[in-house]
Image: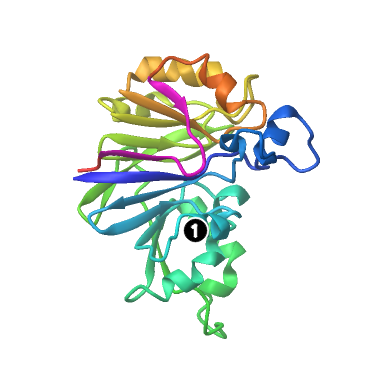
């Protein structure tokens, strides 16, 4: 079963252009003569397959991303972790949740679910609930590495990754994997990432960072895992799109907002 993956956003938590910055990449991102691929909103993806739409993360730019990509229906949302750049678009799911029969299913590990329930308490309260709050239901995923759940004919498997001092959730679906916000991949996850067609990895900048993978490390991880194709995301203004791609082997590309790729999800 073929799926289409759209990169809704490929930027870091501050986005590109970064507010107040006048570096060449930030100027390029908004200049008519610049490279629009340097315009990076906060990171998330859309999966379309079997006449269904599944999102991974909804950051603070989700409203604009949904308009840009004409997202009119969502069947489920998966979350990687509870940081602001991955969850603050949660409230923008409200009108989309009204179009779902029952409640819109949300999938997250326990820590992320607790963050969502705390930040958006008004959505989950049982009493004195606002009538137009999002109609959602959280499903806490099994924390076991490789544990999976089925959605509309595809299996989504939890791939633990290290994000600084915490463990968060990456996902494998069919022969693709999405590992945003990772500084390393623990040994227990390596066997779960074999025989991939598509590997999507964090590559924040050129210099090492305490909670994100940097360019050289991400390239080394690709060479270790040997997917057929790799795409880097969660990128800061340190990486100019065209200049950086010229340094990379042909099977490794920088993702950009709006990029669409196809792969087998089941």
In depth, the one of 244 and 171 nearer the eye is: 244
Residue 211: image location, x then y, percent: 60, 31
Mark 1: secondary structure: helix
In depth, the one of 149 and 97 nearer the eye is: 97
> Which residue is rendered at x = 34% and y = 63% of the image?
75
**Image quadrant assignment for residue 239:** top right
Residue 194 vs 175, above or below: the answer is: above
Residue 251: image location, x then y, percent: 38, 20
Q: Which residue is mark 1?
A: 66
Can residue 243 be seen?
Answer: yes
- Mark 1 residue crowding within 10 angstroms, few (<14) / some (14–19) / many (20+): some
Can residue 214 be seen?
Answer: no
- Residue 252: within the magenta? yes
Residue 34: image location, x then y, percent: 65, 33
Span highlighted in magenta in the image:
251-263
Colouring chosen for the image of the structure? rainbow
Residue 102: image location, x then y, percent: 34, 76
Residue 8 vs 236, above or below: the answer is: below
- Residue 89: within the magenta? no
Can you say which quadrant of the picture contains the N terminus? Answer: top left
Can you say which quadrant of the picture contains the C terminus? Answer: top left
**Image quadrant assignment for residue 196:** top left
Q: Residue furthest front?
A: 33
> Which residue is rendered at x = 37% and y = 72% of the image?
103
In the image, 188: left or right of 84?
left
């Amino acid at each position: 079963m073929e799926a289409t993956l759209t990169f809704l956003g490929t930027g870091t938590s501050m986005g590109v252009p970064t507010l107040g910055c006048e570096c060449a990449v930030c100027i390029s991102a908004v200049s008519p003569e610049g490279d629009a691929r340097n315009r990076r909103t906060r990171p998330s993806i859309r999966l379309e397959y079997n006449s269904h739409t599944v999102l991974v993360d909804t950051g603070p730019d989700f409203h604009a991303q949904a308009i840009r990509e004409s997202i009119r229906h969502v069947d489920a949302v998966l979350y990687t972790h509870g940081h602001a750049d991955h969850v603050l678009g949660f409230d923008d799911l409200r009108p989309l949740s009204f179009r779902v029969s029952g409640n819109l299913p949300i999938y997250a590990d326990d820590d992320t679910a607790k963050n969502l329930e705390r930040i958006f308490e008004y959505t989950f309260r049982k009493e004195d609930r606002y009538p137009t709050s999002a109609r959602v239901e959280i499903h806490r995923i099994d924390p076991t590495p490789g544990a999976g759940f089925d959605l509309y004919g595809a299996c989504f498997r939890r791939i633990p990754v290290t994000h600084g001092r915490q463990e968060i959730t990456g996902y494998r679906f069919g022969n693709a994997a999405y590992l945003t916000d990772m500084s390393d991949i623990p040994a227990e996850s390596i066997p779960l990432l074999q025989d991939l067609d598509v590997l999507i990895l964090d590559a924040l900048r050129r210099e090492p960072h305490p909670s994100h993978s940097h360019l050289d490390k991400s390239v080394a991880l690709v060479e270790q895992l040997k997917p057929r194709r790799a795409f880097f995301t969660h990128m800061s203004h340190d990486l100019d799109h065209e200049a950086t791609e010229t340094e990379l082997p042909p099977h490794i590309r920088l993702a950009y907002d709006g990029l669409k790729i196809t792969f087998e999800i089941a």
